[in-house]
Image (cartoon, rainbow, N blue to C red):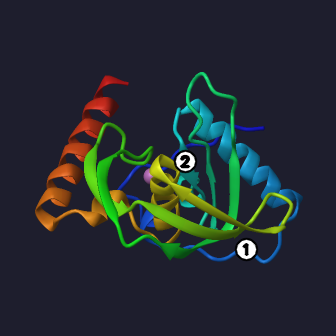
Amino acid sequence: MTKLDIVIAPQPVLKAPTTPVEGVDDALRRLLDDMLETMYAAPGIGLAAPQVGVSKRVCVVDVAGKDERPAPLFLVNPTILMAADEHETAEEGCLSLPEIYAEVERPLAVKVGYLDRDGEPRELEADGLLARCLQHEIDHLDGVLFVDHLSLLKRKMLLRKLAKLQRAKQRAS
Ligand code: NI
């Protein structure tokens, strides 16, 4: 497996809707495995293909805690089939927006349809952190970042902060 480079906002690939995958083959499985390794190394709990510069409708997720057994999910062509009417607000971050965090309101439970790593159709009902993470990753596949759920003012402020942090990082390296 290969660790891939993570794309940092603002890069056009992060804002572009992705192309659905036609079929799950070895090349796609390799991409999924590389994405999982990249996500674990970051470390993060979710990673969508646009975040490694690939505009395909696939993402990986693992919300298992540090002391829990890994529980990776590979989602090909995921879609949200149902979302709870009830919403909740919690803090989110994103590997493509390092050191930026904000409270985001989302449905607290979802049902997601997808193909797994073997190309088998599956459905998953989730709540809590997993539901939030799935929605965040599926957003990525539609070119939506978590800051896009915030007011324009708040979003601009956070993106300015990100740009400043990135400039400081470049100067330091
Ligand atoms: Ni993200």
Q: Can you name the residue that lies furthest to the left here?
A: 153
Q: Secondary structure at mark 2?
A: strand
**Residue 142 got which mark?**
none
Mark 2 Cα within 10 Å, few/some/many (few <14, many 20+)? Answer: many
Q: Quadrant of the N terminus?
A: top right
Residue in the foreground of this view, choosing between 31 and 137: 137
Q: In terms of image quadrants, where is residue 76? A: bottom right
Above or below, 67 relative to 105: above
Q: Secondary structure at mark 1?
A: loop
Q: Quadrant of the C terminus?
A: top left
User: Left or right: 96 with respect to 32?
Assistant: left
Q: Position of residue 169 (x, y in %)?
A: 32, 30
User: Left or right: 45 with respect to 26?
Assistant: left
Distance, label 2 to label 1, CA atoms, is 19 Å
Above or below, 81 relative to 38: below
User: Left or right: 39 with respect to 166?
Assistant: right
In the picture of the structure, the residue carrying the numbered disc 1 is 21
Cβ of disc 2 within 8 Å of ligand 1?
Answer: yes
Going 61% across and 34% down the picture, which residue do you hit?
A: 40
Going 46% across and 66% down the picture, which residue do you hit?
A: 139
Question: Could you tell which of marks 2 and 1 lies nearer the N-terminus?
Answer: 1
Kind of residue at disc 1: Val
Q: Position of residue 166 (x, y in %)?
A: 30, 39
Kind of residue at disc 2: Gly
Going 56% across and 41% down the picture, which residue do you hit?
A: 63
Q: Position of residue 121 (x, y in %)?
A: 79, 71
Above or below, 52 relative to 23: above
**Residue 46 got which mark?**
2
Going 59% across and 31% down the picture, which residue do you hit?
A: 41
Residue 41 visible in the snapshot: yes
Residue 17 visible in the snapshot: no
User: Left or right: 84 with respect to 40?
Assistant: left
